[in-house]
Image (cartoon, rainbow, N blue to C red):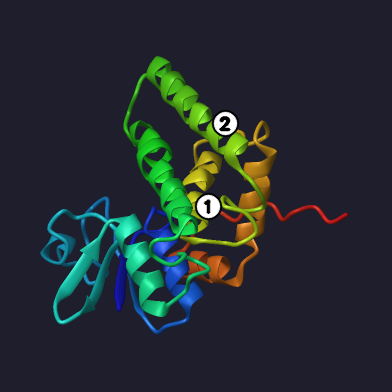
């Protein structure tokens, strides 16, 4: 497998999962803003939409979209801790959170990447805070679905961490802050961040020890 990623972008979540499953993979960090690969060639020759993540899975077959790639990677490795077995309620709960992150939280950050007025920025940040507040209320354990780190947590870790980059305080969301700190201590997360050069995501402060 070969993953194309951009430092700290949503593709980091797939990168984390690849390190979680422990199978060999090749990594290429591209500049998705300029659509340029490390050798200077046009990334769109590989990925026509010019977006990340994109994963090559062999025989010229590529997959895109976080949720799809996450399910493929976890199912391929048989990691039912990261992505529970098909047909189980536990799997649908993980997918439910993945969908929330993708459609409600991830997309809400989009306008902040563009030049917007102060008024519009305030509106966007208010929308993000509404989504964060929902996630805060819905957290049932240290991770999104309980005690186990899943593909949904990998995705949530990346997107919720963008709050630090855009100066959105997580002080009102102690459960989210604790989840980010806990996930940030995982060796796979640290290795992925180091390999990508961090970008939009930095390691949260460690969980205070009692």
Q: Rounded to the nearest whole Å, what is the CA distance between mark 2 and mark 1?
A: 15 Å
Residue 91 is at least partly visible in this image: yes
* Disc 2 versus disc 1: nearer the observer: 2
Residue 157 placement, left or right of 110: right
Above or below, 161 against 37 in this view is above
Q: In x, y percent, where is residue 145?
A: 57, 52
Quadrant housing the C terminus:
bottom right
Q: In x, y percent, where is residue 169?
A: 61, 33
Q: Residue at x 47, y 30 (%)?
A: 128
Q: In x, y percent, where is residue 20?
A: 50, 73
Name the one closer to the observer, 204 or 100. Answer: 100
Q: Write down the quadrant of residue 56 in the picture.
A: bottom left
Q: Which residue is mark 1?
A: 157
Element assignment for label 2? helix
Q: Residues within 10 Å of mark 2 (few under 14, many from 20)?
A: some
Q: Decide which of tag 2 and tag 1 comes sooner along the chain.
A: 2
Quadrant housing the N terminus:
bottom left
Residue 205 placement, left or right of 162: right
Above or below, 70 against 116 in this view is below
Element assignment for label 1? helix
In the image, which disc is placed on residue 133? 2
Q: Residues within 10 Å of mark 1 (few under 14, many from 20)?
A: many
Q: In x, y percent, where is residue 18?
A: 42, 73
Q: Write down the quadrant of residue 63 in the picture.
A: bottom left
Q: Residue at x 19, y 69 (%)?
A: 62
């Amino acid at each position: 497998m070969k993953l194309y990623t951009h430092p700290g972008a949503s593709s980091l979540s797939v990168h984390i999962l690849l390190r979680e499953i422990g199978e060999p993979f090749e990594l290429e960090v591209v500049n998705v803003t300029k659509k340029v690969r490390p050798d200077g060639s046009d990334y769109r020759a590989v990925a026509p939409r010019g977006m990340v993540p994109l994963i090559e899975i062999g025989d010229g077959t590529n997959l895109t979209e976080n949720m799809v790639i996450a399910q493929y990677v976890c199912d391929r490795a048989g990691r039912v801790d990261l992505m529970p077995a098909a047909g189980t309620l536990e799997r649908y709960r993980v997918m439910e959170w993945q969908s929330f992150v993708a459609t409600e939280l991830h997309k809400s950050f989009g306008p902040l990447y563009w030049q917007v007025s102060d008024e519009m920025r305030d509106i966007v940040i208010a929308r993000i805070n509404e989504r964060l507040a929902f996630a805060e209320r819905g957290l049932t354990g240290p991770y999104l679905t309980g005690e186990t780190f899943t593909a949904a947590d990998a995705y949530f870790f990346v997107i919720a961490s963008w709050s630090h980059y855009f100066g959105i305080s997580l002080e009102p969301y102690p459960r989210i802050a604790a989840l980010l700190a806990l996930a940030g201590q995982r060796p796979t997360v640290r290795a992925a961040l180091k390999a990508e050069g961090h970008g939009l995501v930095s390691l949260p402060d460690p969980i205070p020890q009692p």
